[in-house]
């Protein structure tokens, strides 16, 4: 009987001690996810630019929808493409006139809504001070048979964490993407209007 009482007392004190130790031990912090920096640093940015082109929407869409034919983009020497128009499978490589390379993947191709979307496969903040850059190009009917093209992008600044250095902050990313969209739209307009009569 005495042994049973001693054993019960021993188990009771062991349980109390284990509970106290567990309460004192700090919980293991959760492992941050791959995009956890966004919650504590950079916020997503966007840029939307438009241009009017003196050509019918069908003519403009024929150029915009040709994912492997964007050699008209500023600074592009040639384009190497693979696949047809299958999202997440169709890819292209922009060979730049300065010798650089930009790899992109098609993520949307919608002939009914006349829109294409693609993202850059790798970030290069020396070339573009932004990361996770994804863009949509949409062709819309304009007035008098003309076409309105919208170039919309979503991205983060080049330095995703807090206290970004100059040149990799929100302002630098916004300015660079806006300039990229405006230059791309201007090049598209020049290509189409120089090749097609005004309609």
Image: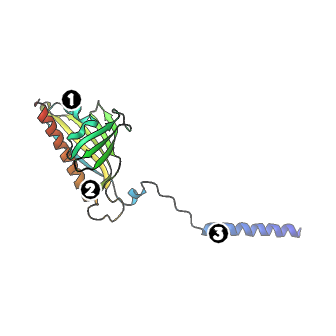
Residue picked out by circle 2: 173
Mark with earlier residue (1, 3): 3
Badge number at residue 21: 3
Sequence-earlier tag: 3 or 2:
3
13 or 191, which is in the foreground? 191
Relative vertical location of residue 102 with respect to residue 23 in this rendering, above or below: above
Within the image, what quadrant is residue 76 found in?
top left
Judging depth in this view, the residue of 9 and 100 nearest the camera is 100
Label at residue 132: none
Residue 56 horizontal/vertical position (percent): 16, 30
Say what secondary structure mark 1 lies in. helix
Q: Is residue 69 visible?
A: yes
Residue at 43% across / 56% down in the picture?
36
Q: Which quarter of the picture shows residue 137?
A: top left
Mark 1 to mark 3: distance in Å?
72 Å
- Secondary structure at numbered mark 2: helix
Alpha-carbon distance for marks 2 and 1?
A: 33 Å
Q: Which disc is residue 58 wearing?
A: 1
């Amino acid at each position: 009987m005495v042994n049973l009482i001693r054993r019960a007392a021993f188990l009771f004190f062991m349980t109390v001690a284990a509970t106290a130790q567990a309460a004192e031990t700090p919980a293991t912090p959760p492992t941050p996810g791959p995009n956890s920096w966004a919650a504590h640093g950079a916020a997503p940015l966007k840029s939307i630019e438009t241009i009017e082109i003196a050509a019918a929407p069908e003519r403009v869409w024929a150029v915009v929808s040709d994912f492997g034919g964007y050699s008209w983009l500023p600074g592009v020497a040639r384009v190497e493409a693979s696949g047809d128009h299958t999202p997440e499978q169709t890819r292209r490589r922009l060979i730049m006139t300065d010798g650089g390379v930009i790899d992109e993947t098609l993520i949307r191709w919608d002939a009914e809504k006349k829109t294409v979307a693609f993202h850059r496969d790798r970030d290069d903040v020396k070339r573009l001070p932004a990361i996770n850059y994804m863009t949509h190009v949409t062709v819309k009917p304009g007035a008098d048979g003309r076409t309105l093209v919208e170039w919309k992008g979503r991205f983060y600044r080049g330095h995703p964490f807090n206290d970004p250095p100059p040149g990799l902050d929100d302002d630098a990313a916004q300015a660079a993407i806006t300039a990229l969209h405006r230059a791309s739209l201007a090049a598209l307009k020049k290509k189409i209007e120089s090749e097609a009569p005004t309609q």
